[in-house]
């Protein structure tokens, strides 16, 4: 028996003989074609949308990798936030250092009597210049942290240096304040020097342990240095007397006052009014008897009076 195939498009015909001999010739090729078609159909059915595009083991592996990447991203974000918080803390510490330096600088400006408009710690220092960007130096967080470390160390060193300088300036200013200098009156004149003189009451030569300053009665008597009042009242020969201990062995006395304005234990400043001029005690008229003692010994006040000029 023959099987005839006709192609109308090409105008050809094929004849297949169906005898056992010819069938054994084309049957394997036909069977292979059928198997290929079946496999192709099965693959299409297995890869249909409702069946999933990839095998389950592959999807499971991808899901695990994505989870691992998400965890790594979360860890990196947490590390970045931790670094940011640490950087913020460092910046806050530096700001505290700067505030302390500003305060110390302001105090030193006052101590050194520097014009605030010339050296103002409340404003940034004047700076300028063209902007030149070095593209070869990328900004790296680690290098920025290292720079902050160096800046913090520099600020800490500067703070210690400024505190030492402040102490020195303050000590120098206090030394000037506690060392007697200047006149105990603002207006007046000297009526009797220190040393041997003719006593106004006896007419004989006698030792005068201080200097007498005369002015109008009731004029203010001023402290020639800062210190603590150790005596304020009547004293034999001195009338109403004020005594001030200035430390470092210095003591000053102001005698013949009409009225005393301070009391024992008061802290007085240089130039402060401590009494009003009078003529109490052994006196011939309104004046102030001024004495300087160093380590318990009376010394010539002239050197301290001249020190203020």
Image: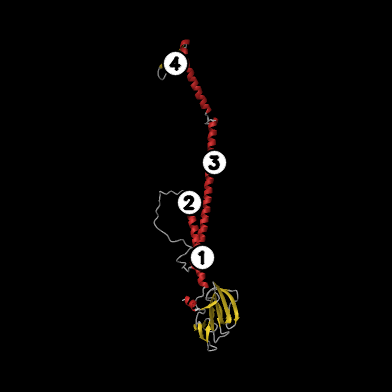
In three-dimensional space, the C-alpha distance between marks 1 and 4, rounded to whole angstroms, equals: 119 Å
Q: Is residue 107 visible to the viewer in this orientation of the structure?
A: no
Q: Which residue is mark 1?
A: 167
Query: Looking at the image, is mark 3 or mark 1 nearer the viewer?
Result: 1
- Please give the label number shown on residue 146: 2
Marks 2 and 3: CB-CB under 8 Å? no
In three-dimensional space, the C-alpha distance between marks 2 and 3, rounded to whole angstroms, equals: 29 Å
Tell me which numbered mark, 1 or 4, is placed earlier along the sequence.
Answer: 4
Q: Which residue is mark 4?
A: 5
Q: Residue at x 48, y 59 (%)?
A: 158
Marks 1 and 4: CB-CB under 8 Å? no
Query: Looking at the image, is mark 2 or mark 3 nearer the viewer?
Result: 2
In three-dimensional space, the C-alpha distance between marks 2 and 4, rounded to whole angstroms, equals: 88 Å
Q: Secondary structure at mark 4?
A: strand
In three-dimensional space, the C-alpha distance between marks 3 and 1, rounded to whole angstroms, equals: 56 Å
Tell me which numbered mark, 3 or 4, is placed earlier along the sequence.
Answer: 4
């Amino acid at each position: 028996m023959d099987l005839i195939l006709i192609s109308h498009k090409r105008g050809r015909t094929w004849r297949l003989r169906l005898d056992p001999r010819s069938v054994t010739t084309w049957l394997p090729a036909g069977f292979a074609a059928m198997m290929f078609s079946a496999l192709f159909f099965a693959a299409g059915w297995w890869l249909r949308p409702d069946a999933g595009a990839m095998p389950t083991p592959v999807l499971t592996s991808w899901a695990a990798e994505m989870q691992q990447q998400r965890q790594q991203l979360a860890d990196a974000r947490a590390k970045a936030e931790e670094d940011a918080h640490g950087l913020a803390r460092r910046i806050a510490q530096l700001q505290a250092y700067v505030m302390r330096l500003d305060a110390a600088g302001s105090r030193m400006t006052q101590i050194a009597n520097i014009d605030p408009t010339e050296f103002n710690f409340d404003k940034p220092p004047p700076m300028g210049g063209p902007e030149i960007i070095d593209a070869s130096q990328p900004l790296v967080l680690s290098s920025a942290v290292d720079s902050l470390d160096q800046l913090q160390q520099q600020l800490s060193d500067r703070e210690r240096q400024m505190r030492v300088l402040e102490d020195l300036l303050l000590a120098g200013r206090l030394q000037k304040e506690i060392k007697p200098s200047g006149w105990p009156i603002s207006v007046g004149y000297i009526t009797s020097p220190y040393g041997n003189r003719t006593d106004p009451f006896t007419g004989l030569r006698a030792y005068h342990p201080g200097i007498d300053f005369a002015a109008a009665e009731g004029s203010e008597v001023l402290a020639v240095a800062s210190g603590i009042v150790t005596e304020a009242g009547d004293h034999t020969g001195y009338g109403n007397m004020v005594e001030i201990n200035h430390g470092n062995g210095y003591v000053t006395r102001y005698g013949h006052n009409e009225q005393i304005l301070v009391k024992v234990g008061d802290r007085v400043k240089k130039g402060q009014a401590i009494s009003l001029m009078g003529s109490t005690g052994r006196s011939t008229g309104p004046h102030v008897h001024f004495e300087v003692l160093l380590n318990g010994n009376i010394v010539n006040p002239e050197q301290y009076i001249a020190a203020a000029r």
